[in-house]
Image (cartoon, rainbow, N blue to C red):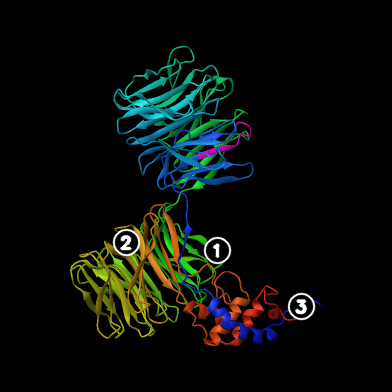
Amino acid sequence: MSRIFNPFKSFNFLFILVFALVILLPELSFASWTIEAVDAPRYFNNLGQRCIAVEKTTNYPHIAYGNVHLYHVYFDGMQWQYETADNTRLVGQYASIAIDSNNKAHISYYDSTNADLKYATNSSGSWVATTIDSTGTVGQYTSIAIDSNNKVHISYYDSTNSDLKYVSNASGSWVTTTVDSTGDMGRYTSIAIDSNNKAHISYYDSTNWVLKYATNASGSWVKTTVDSAAFTGQYSAIAIDLNNKAHISYFDGSNLDLKYATNASGSWIKTTIDSAGIVGQYTSIAIGLNNKVHISYYDQTNFDLKYTTNASGSWVATTVDSAGTVGQYTSAAIDSNNKVHISYYDNTNLDLKYTTNASGSWVATTVDSAGQVGQYASAATDSNNKVHISYYDSANLDLKYATNASGSWIKTTVDSAGTVGLHTSIAIDSNNKVHISYYDSTNLDLKYATNASGFWVTTTVDNVGDVGQYSSIAIDSNNKVHISYFDFTNLDLKYTTNTSGSCVKTIVDNTGEMGRYTSIAIDSNNKAHISYYDSTNWDLKYATNTSGSWIITTLDNTAFMGQYSSIAVDSNNKVHISYYDGSNLDLKYATNASGSWIKTTIDSAGNVGQYTSIAIDSNNKVYISYFDTTNFDLKYATNASGSWVTATLDSAGQVGQYTSIAIDSNNKVHISYLDYANYYLKYATDIPPCFNKGDINMNCVIDNIDAERCLGFAAGLETPTSDEFYLADMNNDSNINSSDALHILQKNLVPCSPFELICGQ
């Protein structure tokens, strides 16, 4: 006879069983912090002149690039695939890539943190990064090539000794050689390998300002000056043809032309290829079928990507891309069909671009967009406990917004008209609509954006002088907007609100240089409270209109007090302010909760307290996020336990600037902040990964054990933590009883527990 789950019959057994189970149940600890990247764009610059390579069998392109990390992107025939080849901080400049006969990638690049030459390959199936040379400052201007045995050859610059260096694993292990040390040698290196697996290197002689060439084709290194005209040889690139002859493209700095040199005839012949304006920087060269030459380069006069070839028998130059400032850091490769592939940098949009004539005409694609996000972040939570963050995209100079309201993080560019989005502040109204104040750096205005109408609308609120820095926004119970901000022209604290139906602007404090680091909060009577910095006297000040007119108070007049202030108002309309003590480099806190202002030093361990943000929970407990400048960490302080407790929440790299804190209806903490090392917007919360009603054990499974614990709470056999109480209170009536346990059993997706009686028989 099959068993049918009967939750009512199971209760008698549950009450009996719970006594034993409670004893055996593990003691649950408080939820740990969850940290994630909300917006993590790749940031890159200083691309190498050989950062593109093409697979020999498929003709698919691969591109290496980086700065914060080393990135590898390749086309799989359908779409671009992105990989982080080296996740170490500040690596990937001067990346150069080569593809071996097995279509595996090999990348040489510069580690700017340690000033080393590094090498990464996925030849084993996964990416492995190795430091090849760490003697001094080495690895800039790196260039890589692969021989017929899939051995690696790298040329690079030794900045410490001003030498050209070369390293190879052709012997089975890495062997480094100084190729040229006769002065300042080795900038703008480029390497190519001939059919005998011999190396050929072009480079710049910075001592004599000439183009040089080195090869070990004879068995030892032989150096030659190819072009002795002054200021020639920068941005050199080399390729070897089927006859093992060398071809070099380079920049003529005297005449500002693109030049080309080859020893194909037996001696070096130099030719000016393009002299139309300032052309020839960032050259890259490749040899196609019939030993024809293909060169990509930058046209600085017109800010264009150009390409030239002698495939027709004479040199023909073409402008390939002229959309904005494009064409720096070009890299060219030729596939087996004699088609050209070029990667390059779009300086207007900070994009990595790629173009090819594989289809018969040039087609350009944006492969990746650089980003630097997370500055001026501001966070708020809505009535559904979802998080909303406004922040500045410093790469694209835009105001951005991110929310997890749909369940996953969605990022939106709210305003891109000029340089906008600095000094952002965000607030959520009772309809869960978003309101953002921010600074328009192009027009020096205070701006405001909202999606209250269903779509984003941006408005200039104040354009009289240079206004809008240090903006802070709050919403009252009528969903009216209140903004405090700094008037840089007049050095005043200003305030604006639309409570009357239209925007009214007021000068709150003009007694000196007032209004930097403003923060605003609204009490239950819809009155405004503003904390700010008095730059004239270096004091923390506070202003409020609770009496009907603005009353200004100096709260802390010890020197250098009040920067990075943040204000919050509790349920009793008492004020709480966190701020930075610039004299002692401490985090301080002030409140009038007792009836008079009390100031306290919360954290004095090192240089702490910049970028403070404060929030109050439903029990009027205080939570503060802030930056630890000594250790470059995100820190957090709270008096929720009755006394102040501080903790380091994130110490991965340089994190914690531009913090913003919010508390949801469950008294859970949400913090947004900048990861400066990676230029990411990050987010931290103390909500456990599994935090759903009924899941008392917070293990992402709702089962009979949760129901048994709920009965234990109801019977007084176990005291729940605040989180456990919330999860067990299925009826949301602030009481735990057998009805809550029944609801948990009904949510149980497991039809039978190991205890037969619970399933019913």
In the image shown, does 438 or 626 lie closer to the viewer? 626
Crowding at label 2, few (<14), some or many (≥20) Cα neighbours within 10 Å?
many
Q: Is residue 60 magenta?
A: yes
The image quarter containing residue 188 is top left
The span from disc 2 to disc 1 (Cα, nearest Å) is 29 Å
Work out which residue is located at the far right of the displayed protein and give it.
Answer: 1
> Residue tagged by mark 1?
408
Residue under the point 41% across and 31% down:
279
Using the image as rendered, state which of residue 547 and residue 154 is in the foreground.
154
Q: Are marks 2 and 1 in contact (CB under 8 Å)?
A: no
Question: Could you tell me which residue is drawn at 58 percent across and 69 percent down?
Answer: 700
Task: Assess whether residue 748 is covered by the magenta stretch.
Answer: no
How busy is the neighbourhood of tag 3: few (under 14 within 10 Å), some, or many (20 plus)? Answer: few
Q: Could you tell me residue 174's position as x and y percent?
A: 44, 30
CA distance for labels 2 and 3: 60 Å
Q: Is residue 460 visible?
A: no
Q: Amino acid at mark 2?
A: Asp
Mark 1 vs mark 3, foreground winner is 3
Q: Characterize the magenta stretch by its predominant secondary structure.
A: loop
Residue 648 lies left or right of residue 340; in this view the side is left
**The label number, if any, that marks residue 628 in the structure image:** 2
Which stretch appears magenta?
A: 56-63
Left or right of 423: which side holds 66? right
The answer to whether the residue labelled 1 contacts the one labelled 3, judged by CB atoms less than 8 Å apart, is: no
**CA–CA distance in space, label 1 to label 3:** 40 Å
Q: Nearer the viewer, residue 604 or 80?
A: 604
- Relative placement, left or right, of 249 versus 507 is right
Q: Which disc is residue 3 wearing?
A: 3
- Provide the secondary structure element on which disc 3 rests: loop
Residue 543 vertical placement versus 324 (above, below):
below
